[in-house]
Image (spheres, helix red, strand yellow):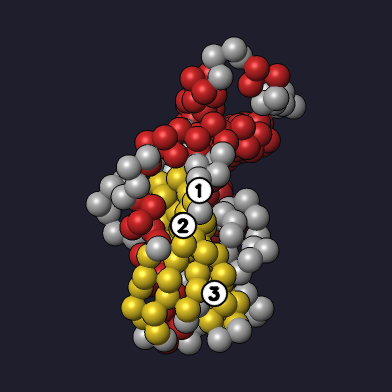
């Protein structure tokens, strides 16, 4: 039984047995009631790396389930929020928005906020210091990898289509820049043949406008090409993550049964 002194009084936490997902619940009593959920999960920027621990108010991981069935209550008010860290020894970072009321999303009052942060970090440290954390991480990999592969199967074709759109846009802008550049040179040749004492003002204005259009199109081509290259790098990274996740499942189930339940990539149109 864990015990945390808080501004609102002592909070006790009873630890559950690990779930098949590697998660552990902490059932709270005292100044705070409800459940805190702790689990190993993928690192946000590297989905095949399970080096992140997330500890959440409520009995679910908010990444997968929006509303807990057993929320954390302080003075009969339910709250949501989580802390997480990537890498042992790094500080616990609060989730975006901090701790908020479940009913309306408003920030928790100062005392409740401080109390729940103490509870979250206390449960988080208890989970992170478990002797069986390596085994819990293996369970988390096997449990979460199929869902991540499903998401990647949907995301990768969309990103590939986006890259092709950006590449087509870059090509179109380059062609436009080339056409305006040629027109500009033609206009410049005509302008040079005008008498110096009576220049053609409309032609001069046309020359300036054409030069501006050529420059604008060239900038647009560079921007589109930069976006396309960035999207291609993202797609390559996601393919690397996908391969890593398949390796995770292969290690968890050498029989290859996972290949029948994890969708392959949908061909991009």
Pick whichever, 118 or 29, lies toward us. Answer: 29
- Mark 3–mark 1 Cα distance, whole angstroms, equals 19 Å
Q: Measured along the vertical axis of the image, is residue 30 above or below residue 177?
A: below
Residue labelled with disc 3:
33
Label 1 crowd bin: few (<14), some (14–19), many (20+), radius 10 Å:
few
Whether residue 92 sits left or right of residue 170 in the image: it is left
In which quarter of the view is residue 162 placed? top right
Q: Quadrant of the C terminus?
A: top right
Pick whichever, 20 or 89, lies toward us. Answer: 20
Q: In the orientation shown, which residue stands out farthest toward the right?
A: 269
Label 2 crowd bin: few (<14), some (14–19), many (20+), radius 10 Å:
some
Q: Position of residue 13 (x, y in %)?
A: 44, 66
Asked which secondary structure carries label 1, the reply is loop
Asked which secondary structure carries label 3, the reply is loop
Q: Position of residue 179 (x, y in %)?
A: 59, 35
User: Is residue 127 at all visible to an observer of this figure?
Assistant: yes
User: Which mark is on residue 15?
Assistant: 2
Q: Nearer the viewer, mark 3 or mark 1?
A: 1
Q: In the orientation shown, which residue stands out farthest toward the top?
A: 255
User: Which mark is on residue 164?
Assistant: none
Pick whichever, 103 or 185, lies toward us. Answer: 103
Pick whichever, 178 or 252, lies toward us. Answer: 252
- Mark 2–mark 1 Cα distance, whole angstroms, equals 7 Å
User: Which mark is on residue 17?
Assistant: 1
């Amino acid at each position: 039984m864990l015990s945390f002194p808080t501004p609102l009084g002592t909070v006790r936490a009873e630890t559950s047995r690990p779930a098949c997902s590697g998660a552990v619940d902490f059932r709270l009593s005292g100044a705070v009631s409800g459940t805190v959920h702790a689990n190993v999960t993928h690192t946000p920027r590297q989905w095949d790396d399970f080096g992140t621990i997330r500890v959440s108010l409520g009995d679910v991981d908010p990444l997968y389930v929006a509303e807990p069935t057993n929320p954390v209550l302080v003075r009969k008010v339910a709250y949501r929020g989580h802390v997480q860290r990537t890498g042992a020894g790094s500080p616990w970072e609060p989730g975006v928005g901090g701790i908020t009321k479940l009913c309306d999303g408003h920030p928790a009052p100062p005392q409740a906020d401080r109390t729940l942060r103490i509870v979250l970090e206390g449960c988080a440290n208890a989970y992170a210091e478990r002797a069986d954390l390596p085994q819990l991480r293996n369970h988390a990999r096997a449990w979460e990898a199929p869902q991540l592969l499903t998401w990647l199967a949907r995301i990768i074709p969309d990103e590939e289509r986006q890259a092709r759109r950006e590449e087509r846009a870059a090509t179109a802008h380059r062609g436009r820049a080339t056409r305006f550049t040629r027109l500009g040179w033609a206009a410049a040749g005509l302008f040079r043949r005008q008498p110096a004492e009576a220049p053609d003002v409309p032609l001069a204005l046309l020359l300036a406008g054409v030069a501006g259009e050529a420059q604008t199109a060239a900038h647009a081509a560079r921007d589109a090409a930069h976006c396309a290259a960035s999207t291609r790098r993202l797609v390559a990274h996601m393919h690397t993550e996908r391969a890593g996740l398949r390796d995770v499942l292969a290690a968890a189930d050498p029989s290859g049964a996972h290949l029948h339940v994890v969708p392959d990539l949908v061909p991009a149109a």
